[in-house]
Amino acid sequence: MRPSLLPLAVAATLLAGCSLIPDYQRPESPVADAYPATVGTTAGESAALLGWREFFRDPALHRLIQIALDNNRDLRTAALNVEAYQALYRIQRADLFPALSAEGGATRQRLPRRLSQTGESTISSQYSAVIGTSWELDLFGRLRSLRDAALEQYLATEEARRSTQISLVASVANAYLTWQADQALLDLTRETLRTYEDSYALTKRSYDVGVASALALSQSRTAVESARVSLAQYQRLVAEDRNALTLLLGSSIPEDLAKPLDLNAELLGEVPAGLPSELLQRRPDILAAEHQLKAANANIGAARAAFFPNISLTANAGTLSPDLSGMFDAGSGTWLFSPQISLPIFNAGSLKASLDYAKIQKNVQVAQYEKAIQTAFREVADGLAARDTYREQLQAQRDLVAASQDYYHLAERRYQIGIDSSLTFLDAQRSLFNAQQALIIDRLAQLTSEVNLYKALGGGWTEQQADLQDAAAPRS
């Protein structure tokens, strides 16, 4: 660097600390400090730190989730978006540094004698080799504001990727549980249909010998046809469930998947609810909304800096010679230094409108950030309420199934010995079938509510927050 440029470079370095970005203040949380009082709410370790392998206890489900993480197209798109925004950040960051380029050129030109000073046609040659640089002095932080905004956008996409993974894990779990529950309902319907068909055959024989009435025969047949309708419905649902799960996996379901799931087994771990304040630190959609808010805040600094002068430096140095062989001879050196300053004077209010727009966008992001918190709070509160009520509902439904089984067995014995009519027996069969169906449906609802609570608390992501911050540090 030439000695005369050193003071200017030092001054630029000292002024580089100027920034017009407003001081960032996180908005106050627009929700209560605690969830509504519910039985069983725990405040232990955050669910976001509970890995999905620990929460989901079924090995087949582990296998399906891993397949989805490896092949799901939505998750792959989210990961590519992270890489794209990281590249945009590196582009914006590069503007802070001088751009250095090397150029070489050659020119040969013939002048006709009418234009030549000697009266004779001439051929002139010029060869050059130059190294040049250009640099905008970021005295008022415009470039650094844009860099910070790009960084926050990049971090927001990283959180969006985490949110996509959490949603994918929960979606695969819910799809798998729904598939298994519908398969259990299909098996129950097949068994019930066989029971109805046996009862119909018995009633038909009694009708043929004049013991049973035509009404009893018709009601028995109605039960059989109703069961066949349910069988077709569940066959369709099982096929649709399988297709939905295949879409989430991004590949076919393994043929050697484990045997049908026992819905009454302990399939899920305990979800620690924690405190609402943990949602601000763990739930990725809230973190993404805050990064978007910080990006909007940084854009205000860039809009403010546009009101001030823009100073850029352009310089080059090299060699210039009429002969290619003499390009590097003594005395062929050349240099150029061209500083420029641009000061906005009149732009019909464009800069003021740009600043107003940046401020409005920040207010929009504040509202979206607060909405994200409120949505998360409601999802967790609903999940905790569902946890308490489903336990009681499921126990009551199990008691109803037990009572319906007693009613069925008693009605069957009384019908076989001729004490009661077939109508009482048919009613007992329907009651037992409906109670067993409701038990499976309630168990599925309980399981999916627990999965959704795990998702609402930020679960489904196995990495620690510190590791995420290290991984999110952009590389220059």
Image (cartoon, rainbow, N blue to C red):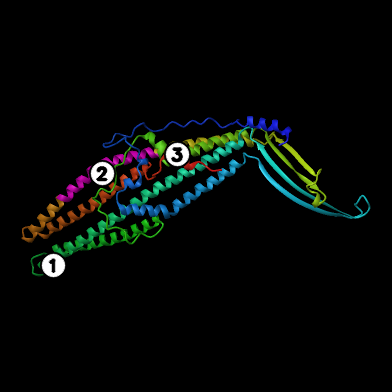
Residue 397, horizontal then vertical, whole percent = 20, 47
Lower sequence index among marks 2 and 1: 1
User: Marks 3/1: CA distance?
Assistant: 68 Å
Q: Write down the region rendered in magenta.
A: 375-402
The answer to whether one can see residue 353 in this image is: no
Of badges 3 and 2, nearer the viewer stands 3
**Left or right of 449, for residue 121:** right
Lower sequence index among marks 3 and 2: 3
User: Label 3 crowding class (10 Å Cα cut-off): few <14, some 14-19, many 20+?
Assistant: many
Q: Residue at coordinates 74% horizontally, 46% vertically from top-left? A: 130
Is residue 50 magenta-colored? no
Q: Amino acid at mark 3?
A: Leu
Within the image, what quadrant is residue 134 found in?
top right
Residue 435, horizontal then vertical, whole percent = 20, 52
In the picture shown, does residue 272 fall above or below 223?
A: above
Determine which residue is flagged by label 2: 390
Report the quarter where the C terminus lies. Answer: top right
The answer to whether one can see residue 327 in this image is: yes
User: Marks 2/1: CA distance?
Assistant: 42 Å
Determine which residue is flagged by label 1: 204
| Direction bottom: furthest residue | 208
Residue 287 is labelled as: 3
Q: Residue at coordinates 31% horizontally, 45% vertically from top-left? A: 450
User: Could you say whether the residue bearing mark 3 is in a helix, strand or loop?
Assistant: helix
**Left or right of 106, for residue 133:** left
Q: Amino acid at mark 1?
A: Lys
